[in-house]
Image (cartoon, rainbow, N blue to C red):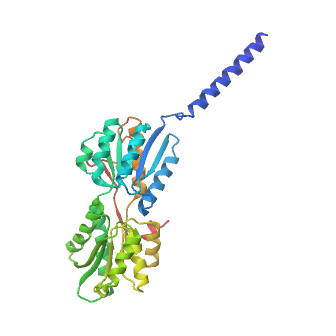
Amino acid sequence: MKKILLVMLGMFMLLACGGEKEEAKGGQVEGGKKIKIGVTIYKYDDNFMATLRKDLEAFAKEDANVELIMNDSQNNQATQNEQVDTMIAKGVNVLAINLVDPAAGQTIIDKAKAANVPVIFFNKDPGTAALQSYEKAYYVGTKPEESGVIQGQLIEKNWKADPKEDLNGDGIIQYVLLKGEPGHPDAEARTTYVIKELNDKGVKTEKLNEDTGMWDAAQAKDKMDAWLSGPNASKIEVVISNNDGMALGALEALKAHQKQLPIYGVDALAEALTLIESGELKGTVLNDGKNQAKAVLELAKNLGNGKDPLEGTSWKFEEKSVRIPYVGVDKDNLAEFKK
């Protein structure tokens, strides 16, 4: 009888241990705290942000202690503000925000600060002043001017290598430029610095047309189509675009007009790389979304665990910002980036 009681007691203890293990798999994963990261993307159908979002989700799947709460802000800042309120109310540990409007950064920070929730902005910079207003606010992105500089270097390199690009032989690049969202730090910097870099390198330029395509291929196609139907159509020698999406729109317009011109974008989207390989696009600038996603997730995990945001990572801060470098891509180094 004593032996039977001992066996039954042993079985009961084993079952109890098993029950405890199952409970640990619920709100908190064994071996660490379950971090809930509330994420907003300014709009899901932006080409670059769609790629970055997939990278972010892929990295998160590698860690059972991370849960992403994803939101599409549909290019509406009021919608994004409501999403942030909802995520804070649901008890997220960290916010990761791709702003609709960079000027709204302070509003988001005020919400996060009131709830004592760390916030990481990415891709759209809220500005140093906003970040400095809250000790738990950070940014992951790039140096916007760098993309313009590198794009200018690509244009200069190929312009000097191929005299046929100077259609009228006057030694001046006659160009049209498709700009992103007016006021967006990346759009403003890329527009300014691509031309500044060309001029600093001794390349003369003449702007024939410039207009916003709002980062959108369809809008860019319409703008390019209008320019190709306008009085400067035969003078255009180079097409400069603030991103690959608009570069693709410009390419469609050129095809419709049975014309081929050097087109330069930014982002190094997979489709753009394929078109560089075929010679339909001349160059792009890698906007390294994969490393941006990795940095966002690594900082968020540290902050969610109450650690220094950079602990155990290779990232460095410049005034509370992690800056991921850009890389120029054309046919000469395409193989390094083509998957």
Does residue 232 sit above or below 195 in this rendering? below
Comparing 68 with 105, the one in front is: 105
Numbered-mark total: 0
What residue lies at 38% left-to-right and 34% top-to-bottom? 306
Does residue 267 sit above or below 171 in this rendering? above
Can see residue 23?
yes
What residue lies at 24% left-to-right and 49% top-to-bottom? 128
Percent of width and height locating residue 174:
26, 81
Residue 289 figure quarter? bottom left
Residue 199 figure quarter? bottom left
What residue lies at 32% left-to-right and 74% top-to-bottom? 240
Comparing 253 with 305, the one in front is: 253
Does residue 69 sit above or below 175 in this rendering? above
View extreme (top): residue: 2
View extreme (right): residue: 1
What residue lies at 22% left-to-right and 70% top-to-bottom? 196
Quarter occupied by the N terminus: top right
Percent of width and height locating residue 245:
40, 68
